[in-house]
């Protein structure tokens, strides 16, 4: 007979042969077709940690049942909320719920009793992990005026934008990128003043998860030349055959052993070093 709407009419005649026809207001809908999904939407895609994901379907006709959905892997959904032919479920992403999820609907039944089971919905991706730093380098660790500090890092995943790298309160400039590898540089200036600065990184992945990292390494800004804190020559006075010892303590570690000179010239042995003392 096929699907369709059919109206009911009545024809009557009395013994005298008078005839009349009546068409009822009511109609009968012949429905032999199971309901279908018109649209399915899972949003946001990708989902991030703490975000509320909603899954919305639109069906082809009114339903007699309240459909339920299942996600693989399993998630706990709230709903559905019904609005005409639209049904919406929600779920708040928890820690560890990362991966690709497939949604299916257990059963759709229309008012005529036509049903369809295990209807596939949508696939969507969830990233519930904060981005981080796999590896990094900081060179040099002590920097003077005009020298360039270089920081390299590799992120754990793709990012929506380049990380923000802070040198204390100074934002470093990104100078290169290759995939998940980034290079940042900063040229030290006398206006920065002496001091030790830490390095921190702020990252945001494609799903919007935020991550932070603080490097163990610090950078020493040093714009002051080393000075002599103490110096001592002993014995004083010295006699023939005696050994003269000259002891000097500096204000900081130096890159090369100091060269000792006397006037008139004397030949001193190679100095022994103990920290900043020679």
Image (cartoon, helix red, strand yellow):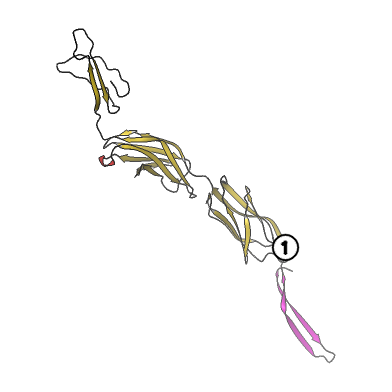
In the picture shown, does residue 120 fall above or below 27?
A: above
Q: x, y percentage for residue 92?
A: 57, 53
Q: Secondary structure at mark 1?
A: loop
Which residue is nearer to you in this view: 55 or 113?
A: 55
Asked whether residue 191 appears in the rendered view, the answer is yes
Q: Residue furthest bottom?
A: 16
At x 55%, y 49%, the residue is: 125
Which residue is nearer to you in this view: 3 or 47?
A: 47
Q: Quadrant of the C terminus?
A: top left
- Residue 9 colored magenta? yes
Which residue is nearer to you in this view: 15 or 113?
A: 113
| Residue corresponding to mark 1 | 114
Residue 28 found in image quarter: bottom right
Residue 230 found in image quarter: top left
Side of 10 where 220 appears, left or right? left
Q: x, y percentage for residue 266?
A: 18, 14
- Residue 120 colored magenta? no
Q: x, y percentage for residue 237?
A: 18, 13
Range of magenta residues: 1-29
Q: x, y percentage for residue 221?
A: 31, 36
In the picture shown, does residue 138 fall above or below 5?
A: above
Query: Taken as a whole, is the magenta stretch helix, strand or loop?
Result: strand
Asked whether residue 140 appears in the rendered view, the answer is no
At x 28%, y 36%, the residue is: 147
């Amino acid at each position: 007979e096929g699907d369709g709407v059919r109206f009911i009419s009545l024809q009557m005649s009395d013994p005298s042969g008078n005839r009349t026809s009546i068409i009822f207001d009511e109609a009968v809908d012949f429905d032999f077709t199971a309901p279908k999904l018109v649209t399915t939407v899972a949003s946001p895609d990708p989902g991030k940690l703490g975000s509320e994901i909603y899954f919305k379907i639109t069906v082809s006709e009114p339903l007699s049942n309240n459909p339920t959905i299942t996600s693989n892997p399993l998630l706990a959904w709230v709903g559905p909320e019904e609005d005409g032919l639209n049904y919406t479920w929600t779920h708040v992403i928890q820690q560890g719920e990362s991966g690709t999820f497939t949604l299916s609907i257990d059963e759709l039944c229309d008012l005529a009793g036509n049903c369809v089971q295990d209807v596939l919905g949508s696939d969507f991706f969830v990233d519930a992990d904060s981005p981080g730093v796999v590896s990094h380098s900081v060179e040099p660790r002590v920097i003077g005026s005009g020298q360039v500090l270089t920081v390299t890092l590799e992120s754990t995943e793709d990012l929506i934008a380049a990380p923000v790298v802070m040198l204390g309160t100074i934002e470093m400039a990104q100078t290169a990128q290759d995939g998940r590898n980034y290079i940042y540089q900063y040229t030290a200036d006398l206006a920065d003043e002496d001091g030790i600065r830490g390095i921190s990184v702020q990252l945001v992945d494609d799903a919007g998860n935020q991550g932070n990292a603080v490097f163990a390494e610090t950078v020493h800004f040093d714009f002051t030349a080393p000075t002599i804190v103490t110096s001592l020559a002993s014995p004083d006075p010295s006699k023939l055959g005696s050994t003269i010892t000259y002891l000097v303590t500096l204000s900081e570690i130096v890159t090369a052993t100091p060269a000792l000179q006397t006037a008139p010239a004397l030949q001193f042995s190679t100095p022994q070093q103990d920290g900043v003392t020679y």
